[in-house]
Structures are given as C-alpha cells and as structure tokens.
Image: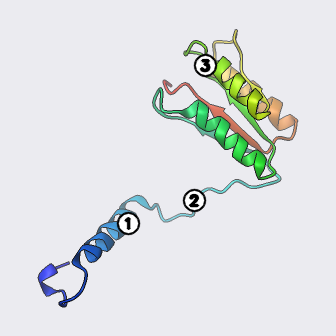
Amino acid sequence: MNLKDMAPGLNKRKAIQTVVHEELVKMLDPGVPSWKPQKGQTNVVMLVGLQGSGKTTTATKMASYYKCKGWRPALVYCNTLKAGAFDQLAQNATRAKIPYYGSHSERDPISITQTGLDKFKEAGYDMILVDTSGRH
C-alpha cells in the first residue's frame, strides 16, 4: 500500500488498520474450519499452558458454560505437581455442581487422565475437560 497514491479524503488510518488485519489473518489462519464440539458424542478438551495462567479456573468456567448450554460436562484433574491444586479444582467443581476426577495418591498424570476419561466416557458425559499441570 502506498499512502501517497491514495485518493484525498480517504481515511489512511483505517486503510492501514485494514491492511495490517488482513496480513495478520493470512499469517495466523490455517485455512481450515475451527474445531466445534459435537453433541451426542464424547468431546475431550485438554487445557495446557504456562504454570499460573488460569487453566484450573478456566476448566471450571468452561464446564459451567457447557452445563448451562445443556451438555454433560466433567472435569479430569491430572496435576500431580502443585500442592493443593486438586483441592482447588474439587472446591470449584463442587460449587458448580460438576463431576470431577483426580487423585491425591496417584503420581502418574497419564494414569489419572486415562482413568478419568474412561470413567466419564462410560457414564455418557459429552464434554470432558482435562486440566494439566502446565509443566509437561
């Protein structure tokens, strides 16, 4: 875009914003439709991110959102590294009336995740949110 070639009276700021937006979309858009959960089948979402970024709180908020929309959400908590973190999720999930699975004694996050997924799939939950430690 050459600003000098633009017709007088055109909003140059808006033109620059439009071009920058289009270029960012080209760089970030993979060109495929975004994932959408399907009702009537099991959907599993794993929350990953940096330690302290709000994964546990977000998991409960997402589960509450889907519950309000008529889904059957459940939470699986596989953070074995943070002391008291399972209790935080249990408290949040209990307050929101959302079933959850985790373990105080099991140290293997993969085992916890698999057991929780099996349990909730068998029970017919359609939105299972897996909260991770952020360190794996």
Amino acid on which the number 1 mark rests in the picture: Lys
- From the viewer's perspective, tell me whether residue 81 is left or right of residue 42: left
Amino acid on which the number 3 mark rests in the picture: Ala
Which residue is found at the position 82% from the left and 29% from the top? 119
**How far is disc 2 from disc 1 in space, using C-alphas?**
15 Å
* Image disc number at residue 26: 1
Which sits earlier in the primary sequence, circle 3 or circle 2? 2
- Quarter residue 78 falls in: top right
Give the residue at mark 3: 85
Which residue is found at the position 71% from the left and 23% from the top? 90
In what element is the residue under mark 3? helix
**How far is disc 3 from disc 2 in space, using C-alphas?**
31 Å
x, y (%) of residue 11?
A: 25, 81
x, y (%) of residue 75?
A: 72, 32
Which sits earlier in the primary sequence, circle 3 or circle 1? 1
Which sits earlier in the primary sequence, circle 2 or circle 1? 1
- The correct choice, above or below, for 114 with respect to 2 in the image is above
- The correct choice, above or below, for 21 with respect to 49 in the image is below
Which residue is found at the position 77% from the left and 45% from the top? 67
Nearer the camera: disc 3 or disc 2: 3
Tags 2 and 1 in contact by the CB under 8 Å rule?
no
In what element is the residue under mark 2? loop
Give the residue at mark 2: 34
Tags 3 and 1 in contact by the CB under 8 Å rule?
no
Q: How crowded is mark 2: few (under 14 residues within 10 Å), some or many (20 or more)?
A: few
Number of marks drawn: 3
